[in-house]
Amino acid sequence: MMVLVGLGALLALAAVVRLLVGPSAGGTLLALPATGEVWSIRLTRVALGVIVGGSLGVAGAMLQSLLRNPIASPDLLGMASGAALALLVVAFASTIGIAGSVALRTPAAVAGSMAVLAVVYALGQRRGLIEPVSLILVGVIISIVAASIGQLLVQLMGERGFIAGRLLLGTLRDDATRTEMGVAGAMLAIGALLGAAWGPAMDAASMGEDEARSVGVRLKRLRAGLLLASGALTAGAVVLAGPIGFVGLIAPHGVRLIAGPGNRVVVLGAGLAGAALIVAGDALVMALPLSTGRVPLSIVTAIIGGPVFIAMLRREMRRGVRL
């Protein structure tokens, strides 16, 4: 419980910093907003950061439990790229006269996210057993293919492709609608509650199928629930910010190192940690103004998460050799 309180305090601190960071009338980057409109803009970006980071953190914790793989995450398994590609398909459909609207974006992103995870899950096995390194490699390959197809669609859309292509940058959207934020926020709340409720079953499943069944865990139902929840959470984050990497990897792993393997705490803690990371990252982006525009948030998370991922992957490979 103290871990969750501490992470909540960290998120509150990140939110305060983000509310203070931004251009002001005096030309400084650290000042209280002078008008109600500026307050509204900054509060909206804090809310976006909480929803996006929380969704990615919870989804990462669920995937790592589902696949029994500490290096699983929505971006490394291709789910974020699949959701982004689905959004670009909807945008492309609207440009050529086929039905496409804002209302279709979230369901399309959910479908794309879960479809990719299903493919990766099927191809990342050998003799019925999941191989962690193979799983990641398949996910990375599918991510590259999905991103390439997305770039092609952006090219085919011409001038409209410039706006649609922003989905691939990985940054909090200034034009996110209240409906999209509300749906994604609701999915985050439901996903976090489900993750907390499923925590004991996830703990039992981590010990093996026989042990889980012996205590009454319905593995098929649990895995289906984790798959659906992680896909929906990833899709909600992508709709609001595009694909942002490594948050779903770092947040659960960091909480697990501090609080232990209990999945109930890991799921809730990963949501808080992911939210704090995105909100703090957005504050850093706003504190680094460039003449060419804002630095995409995905660059910040990649600089932080890349070395962490390499270290974790090397550790998993060494474990595989010893086995």
Image (cartoon, rainbow, N blue to C red):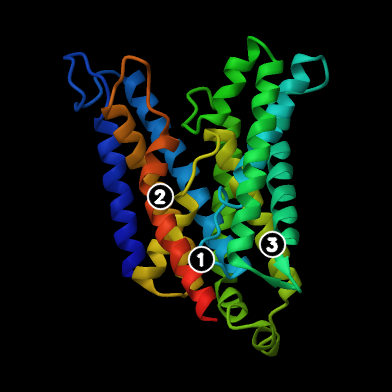
Give above or below for 235 relative to 151: below
Residue found 55% across the figure and 81% down from its top: 323
Residue 312 lies in quadrant: bottom left
Mark sitting earlier along the chain (2/1): 1
Image position, residue 130 (x, y; %): 67, 69
Seen from the viewer's position, the closer of residues 127 and 162 is: 127
In the image, 309: left or right of 15? Answer: right
Which type of secondary structure does the marked residue at label 3 adopt? loop
Residue at far top of view: 159
State which mark lies toward you, 1 or 3.
Answer: 3
Quadrant in the picture for the N terminus: bottom left
State how many labels appear: 3
**Residue 314 shows up from this direction:** yes
Image position, residue 287 (x, y; %): 26, 29
Tag 2: residue type?
Gly
Callout 2: few (<14), some (14-19), or many (20+) C-alpha neighbours within 10 Å? some
Mark sitting earlier along the chain (1/3): 1
Which type of secondary structure does the marked residue at label 2 adopt? helix
Which type of secondary structure does the marked residue at label 1 adopt? loop
Tag 3: residue type?
Gly
Residue at far right of view: 98
Callout 3: few (<14), some (14-19), or many (20+) C-alpha neighbours within 10 Å? many
Label 2 sits on residue: 305
Residue 257 lies in quadrant: bottom left
Tag 1: residue type?
Pro
Residue found 23% across the figure and 18% down from its top: 24
Label 3 sits on residue: 124
Residue 70, label in figure:
1
Seen from the viewer's position, the closer of residues 185 and 305 is: 305
Callout 1: few (<14), some (14-19), or many (20+) C-alpha neighbours within 10 Å? many
Image position, residue 205 (x, y; %): 62, 78
